């Protein structure tokens, strides 16, 4: 199965899922190695990760709570702020990067809880695992794997987080179906991601670098709603983030991407005998 938005290369030929994943893996492997930041391919990185993270919704307390270089300034929101985590929850972060959201979630779930980060980039997994020690996070682990094929047991997770990652997948419906598989009945999805507000220019749709930089693979809110419903999720809510134009513009020095993409909070639930208040 494939995403509803075709992805093509600069000559107009469709990129395979393997080619898309390779572009993403190479980009984020470089970011992990060089401790680079900024989601956009050509965007300005003059601001520190702390400055930009405040714009997407992190508090000073959250930013000061995580040690090391876990915050790579790659997100477009703060999924832990909408997740309503409880002590003892098992949490899964899709595309966990350096582990920043995992370490924030670990504070909320406490020693009785457990946090799993999954990322397909080996360099990111290595960085995140080093950050476990600097954060004394005994309840966090990182596993290498693709978010379409999660290395997680069926019905073993209470909450799934993700921060500007699902739009990188060539098969978003499969991501949501596998997310549904690993959630316990009554579990929920709480993610931040970029969504399209209008059709992208052809050159952005056909640029592998754009796909790897959070733009070219984004889809519209109605498309996401359909995918989530087909995957089995109920109580679906997708809310665009207000006043986000400023930091979206920083993703590209050559054009205003806020004309096409807006960050949004995306939530859904897996029905079951238990429900979260």
Image (spheres, rainbow, N blue to C red):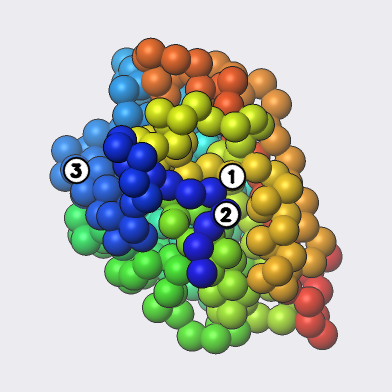
Q: Is residue 192 left or right of residue 18?
A: right
| Residue under the image location 53 percent in, 49 percent down | 5
Q: Quick check: 126 above or below 34? A: below
Q: Position of residue 216 (x, y in %)?
A: 45, 38
State the image quarter where residue 48 is shown.
Answer: top left
Determine which of the numbered discs, if any, sits on residue 30 in the image.
3
**Which residue is nearer to you in this view: 87 or 55?**
55
Determine which of the numbered discs, if any, sits on residue 4 in the image.
2
How much space separates mark 1 and mark 2, taking CA atoms? 8 Å
* Chain-order first, disc 2 or disc 3: 2
Q: Are marks 1 and 2 in contact (CB under 8 Å)?
A: yes
State the image quarter where residue 132 is shown.
Answer: bottom left
Is there any visible trace of residue 127 in the rendered image? no
How much space separates mark 3 and mark 1, taking CA atoms? 26 Å
What residue sits right under mark 1 in the picture? Answer: 219
Q: Position of residue 43 (x, y in %)?
A: 35, 21
| Residue under the image location 55 percent in, 86 percent down | 154
Quadrant position of the C terminus in the picture: bottom right
Q: Position of residue 242 (x, y in %)?
A: 70, 26
């Amino acid at each position: 199965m494939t995403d509803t938005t075709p992805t093509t290369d600069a000559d107009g030929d469709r990129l395979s899922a393997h080619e898309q994943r390779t572009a993403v893996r190479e980009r984020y492997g470089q970011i992990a190695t060089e401790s680079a930041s900024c989601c956009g391919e050509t965007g300005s990185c003059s601001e520190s990760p702390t400055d930009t993270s405040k714009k997407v919704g992190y508090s000073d307390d959250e930013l000061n709570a995580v040690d090391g270089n876990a915050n790579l300034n790659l997100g477009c929101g703060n999924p832990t702020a909408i997740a309503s985590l409880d002590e003892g929850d098992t949490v899964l972060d899709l595309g966990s990067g350096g582990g920043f959201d995992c370490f924030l979630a670990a504070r909320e779930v406490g020693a009785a809880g457990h946090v799993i980060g999954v990322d397909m980039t080996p360099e990111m997994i290595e960085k995140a695992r080093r950050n476990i020690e600097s954060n004394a996070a005994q309840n966090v682990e990182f596993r290498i794997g693709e978010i379409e094929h999660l290395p997680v047991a069926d019905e073993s997770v209470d909450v799934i987080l993700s921060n500007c990652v699902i739009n990188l997948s060539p098969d978003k419906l499969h991501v949501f179906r596998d997310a549904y598989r690993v959630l316990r009945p009554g579990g929920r999805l709480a993610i931040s991601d970029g969504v399209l507000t209008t059709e992208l220019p052809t050159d952005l749709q056909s640029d592998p670098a754009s796909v790897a930089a959070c733009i070219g693979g984004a889809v519209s809110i109605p498309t996401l709603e359909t995918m989530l419903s087909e995957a089995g999720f109920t109580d679906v809510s997708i809310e665009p983030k207000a006043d986000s134009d400023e930091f979206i513009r920083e993703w590209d020095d050559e054009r205003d991407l806020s004309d096409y993409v807006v960050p949004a909070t995306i939530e859904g639930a897996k029905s079951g005998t238990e429900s979260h208040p």
